[in-house]
Image (cartoon, rainbow, N blue to C red):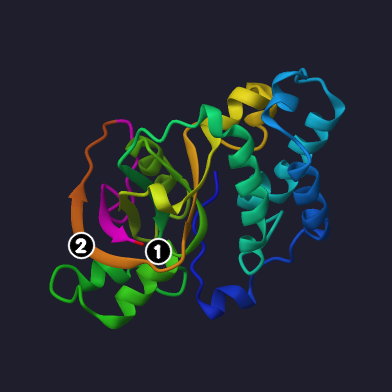
Amino acid sequence: MKYAMPVDPRVLQKDYPSDPSLDTIPELVEFLKSLTTKDFKNSTSKASWKIELSDKIHNLWYTINMKQGVNLADREKLIPVFQELSRLSKPYENIHFNKLYRGVRASNHEPRILTFNYPDELDDPELIEHLENLAYGLRSWSWDFKDAIKWSQNVSKRKDRVIFELSNPANSVVLDCDALVKIMGKELAYDMFDPNEIIVFIDNPKILNIEREEEFDEEASYFLGDNFYFKVSISN
């Protein structure tokens, strides 16, 4: 799964170079435009063009978590690709959720900014900007709150945990990846995206509310207060 990287200039300076396959995006978009939903449904998961498509999306998107694929500065170039995949899988789309969630950690530059500001300085401009930067952009979200909790646990425990909650997300959804499973098959689709993954583009995040939530999990190992997270409600 892809974890948030804040759009802080200091982060952009240290970001990894995009994979050379970035240059193939226009060609990929044109190929997708030539397809119909029936093309997917009338071919097997072993069709060479499906395997090639899965490999391309895997290299561009799925490997982001390993600092490969498309970097943060180039991320939005993938929107036309996902829009075409959404068109093709539209008949199987099921926007059954009214909230989406994303679990992240605070930036390396201000790893405990929420801890230091909560609860008395929640209107601090630096805190608001930090959170808006974390929320901004083309990101992986989920309709399952448990996914967000898991994502927030998978990186450095020395940084504050943040669970974003986006209400009424329909207009921000770029691709319902679960729908793509219906036309690609699980084997290929899950090499491109994760289960429950919803790709969302947030271009104007607004912080609505911040709450500190305790988490009690007997199986979890906590470090530096990692038994809590900050639930941040946003709009777009």
Query: How many labels sit on residues?
Result: 2
Residue 96's tag is none
Magenta stretch encompasses residue 230: yes
Residue 89, horizontal then vertical, whole percent: 59, 33
- Mark 2 highlights which residue? 209
Magenta stretch encompasses residue 172: no
In the displayed structure, would residue 106 be above or below residue 38? below
Mark-to-mark CA distance, 2 and 1: 17 Å
Residue at image location 38% in from the left, 38% down from the top: 143
Residue at image location 27% in from the left, 58% down from the top: 232
Residue 201, horizontal then vertical, whole percent: 49, 57
The image quadrant where one finds the C terminus is bottom left
- Mark 1 highlights which residue? 106
Question: If you read the primary sequence from the N terminus, does the residue marked by circle 2 or circle 1 appear first?
Answer: 1
**Mark 2: amino acid:** Asn
Q: Is residue 12 left or right of residue 41?
A: left
Q: Residue 111 sits in which quadrant?
A: bottom left
Q: Is residue 187 left or right of residue 118?
A: right
> Could you say which is closer to the camera, residue 181 or residue 150?
181
Residue 211, horizontal then vertical, whole percent: 18, 57
- Residue numbers of the magenta segment: 219-235
Q: Residue 117 sits in which quadrant?
A: bottom left
Residue 229, horizontal then vertical, whole percent: 27, 52
